[in-house]
Image (cartoon, grey):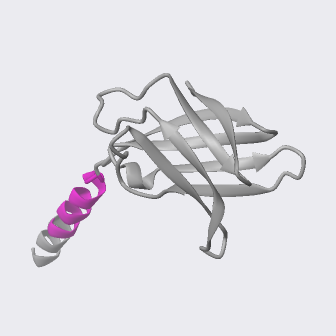
Amino acid sequence: MMNKWLFSMVFAVLLGFSSTQAQKAYDQVFYTGKTQNITLLLTFTHGYMGASEIKTTDQKTKKTSKFLPASDSPDATGNIRFDHISVSGKKLNDYMVINGLDDAASDAPASIKGYYFFNGKRYPFKLLKRK
């Protein structure tokens, strides 16, 4: 009788754990675009701006880079800056500024404009939402 009760309890506990699912805190929206022979992939975490990132690939050298948000929210003008971070964690001099990312909006926009700043020059780009 004790074995049946123990088996029932273990089964109930295991069944409870298997049906529990983690809730998603935010949605990821992907955007792609190009500027100056560089392919851009923005992973916009709608609901938590600080987890967003931009990955770049240089089309000539195939070198990849990562840009992370400088803050968790846009500035007063609605722009958010993404700093270039090396694999060792060092912040580099080039950066990107994205216009129009509104984390509070109910839907992510179909396209986003921004600028890539490198060696004192500004290169515009447009990112399109992937479907």
Magenta span covers which residues? 9-22
Q: Quadrant of residue 63?
A: bottom right
Rendered location of residue 77, percent (x, y): 37, 38
Q: Is residue 111 left or right of residue 47?
A: right
Q: Is residue 44 magenta?
A: no
Rendered location of residue 42, percent (x, y): 57, 42
Residue drawn where x is 16% and y is 65% of the image:
8
User: In the rendered view, would you say 86 is above or below 76?
Assistant: below
Main secondary structure of the magenta stretch: helix
User: In the rendered view, would you say 16 is above or below 42?
Assistant: below
Rendered location of residue 2, percent (x, y): 11, 77
Hey, which residue is sitting farthest right in the picture? 60
Residue drawn where x is 22% and y is 63% of the image:
11
Q: Is residue 14 magenta?
A: yes
User: In the rendered view, would you say 63 is above or below 126?
Assistant: below
Q: Is residue 75 left or right of residue 34?
A: left
Q: Quadrant of the N terminus?
A: bottom left
